[in-house]
Image (cartoon, rainbow, N blue to C red):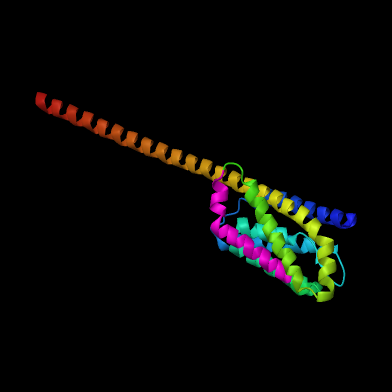
Amino acid sequence: MSSQLIKDLLLNTALLLSISIVYNLFFIRIDRRKKWPEAVLGLFLGGVGILLMINTVSFANGIIFDTRSILISVSGLFLGYLPTVIAALMVSLYRLYLGGGGALTGVLVTVTSAAIGLLWHRYRLPKIVKKSAHVWPELYLFGLLVHLVMLADMLTLPNAQVSAVLQAITLPVLIIYPLGTLLLCLVMLQGLKNQAADDNLRQSRENYKNLYYEFQKKNHCCAHCWTRSRIWFFIRISKAFI
């Protein structure tokens, strides 16, 4: 296991986590009920994926490794279909543009990572968000599954390279990538919970404001009715003495 390979993978993972913090600061509050913000988010994620591939870990004969599998799988899990499909398409096209013996395998890694993330989004995300604690084992297993499938995708490389590639990357990938996936998932999950808390607070303020206006309206109506009753009473008394 090369120490330089581990160092490069750690730097690539750190870059991804840094970008995820930027996402939580600026993109988490976009209106997900409309399609165009999701499309913009997909373009942003695709750009992040390309940036990760620019800062990649080169192996041999056009075979490269980076953390786009983490990015795409976590995007599928937390952001859903449109952003993930756009990001995966951009990343795949750029990987084909780079070429090399591992180009098709790189596209396959992107596709399988997106598919696993979207399956988790469909069947597990609501339960994960509702959990108050102890979500990390499932998120770690999610990352482990994604990257076990990624290693299986390496079998599509040319036969002469499969053994050498798996021997070099298996241990670093199984150590670093699931942990990187877990950390990114925790960052995204905290962002979702913060967003939900903000939405609940905003809704509570709106409800309070509506109740206040309704109360004011009722009080105004009651005061108006009381004034009319008093005028009518004095008119009747006046007529009684005429």
Q: Nearer the viewer, residue 170 or 112?
A: 170
Q: Quadrant of residue 78?
A: bottom right
Q: Residue at x 57, y 63 (%)?
A: 35
Residue 130 counted in the magenta span = yes
Q: Is residue 207 left or right of residue 226?
A: right
* Location of the C terminus (image quadrant): top left
Q: Residue at x 86, y 66 (%)?
A: 59
Is residue 179 visible to us here? yes
Relative height, residue 181 to residue 229 (above, below): below
Residue 4 counted in the magenta span = no
Write the start and end of the magenta stretch as one range. Answer: 107-131
Q: Quadrant of residue 9?
A: bottom right
Q: Position of residue 241 (x, y in %)?
A: 10, 23
Is residue 39 visible to us here? no
Q: Residue at x 81, y 65 (%)?
A: 166
Q: Position of residue 162 (x, y in %)?
A: 81, 70
Q: Residue at x 17, y 29 (%)?
A: 235
Kindly report the secondary structure that dominates the magenta region of the rendered protein: helix
Q: Nearer the viewer, residue 114 or 32?
A: 114
Q: Nearer the viewer, residue 209 or 233?
A: 209
Q: Position of residue 70 (x, y in %)?
A: 71, 58
